[in-house]
Amino acid sequence: MPEREERFHVETVVSDDAVCVRVVGVIDIATVAAFRAALWAAPTRTELRVDLSGVRLLSAAGVRTLVAARLWVRSQGGNLVLVDPPPLVERVLRATGLGRVIPVVGTTPQRVLAAA
């Protein structure tokens, strides 16, 4: 039976006060450049939300990119928020301490509507 594989992709949704970057797939050395490019290409808003609900794996390269993105977003006067990481990604955020530096929130109807 063939294994179902989701390809890596990033979607960006812009609202008046926030940008939501939704990532699907694996964030590793092979995809981190596209992930980084999507984060840096996001328009400046009060909040940059990175929706991790579709991420199956977050490697060290992805963690480094999130750290750099936090610094970049803060230098622009905004905040970076990680949204709805699955359990495996949440464990990586806890193990690296990134969850203590970047706010991690679950998906709430208000956030989903605000990002649309």
Image: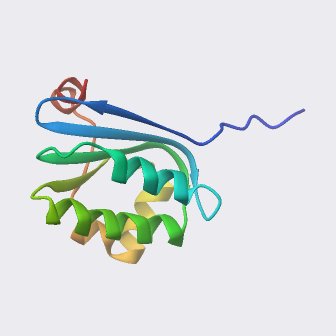
Task: State the image coordinates of residue 9 (x, y, percent, origin top left).
Answer: 55, 39
Residue at image point 13% right, 55% down: 78
Task: State the image coordinates of residue 52 (x, y, percent, origin top left).
Answer: 41, 46
Q: How many marks?
A: 0
Left or right, 26 with respect to 43, comes to right
Task: State the image coordinates of residue 2 (x, y, percent, origin top left).
Answer: 87, 34
Residue 12 vs 80, above or below: the answer is above
Query: Hey, which residue is sitting farthest bottom in the picture?
Result: 96
Residue at image point 36% right, 35% down: 12
Residue at image point 36% right, 41% down: 21
Quarter-wise, where is residue 69 in the image?
bottom left
Quadrant in which the N terminus appears: top right
Q: Nearer the viewer, residue 94 or 66?
A: 66
Quarter-wise, where is residue 115 in the image?
top left
Quadrant in which the C terminus appears: top left
Quarter-wise, where is residue 36 in the image?
bottom left
Residue at image point 31% right, 30% down: 13
Left or right, 44 with respect to 32, comes to left
Q: Nearer the viewer, residue 51 or 34?
A: 34
Q: Nearer the viewer, residue 52 or 32?
A: 32
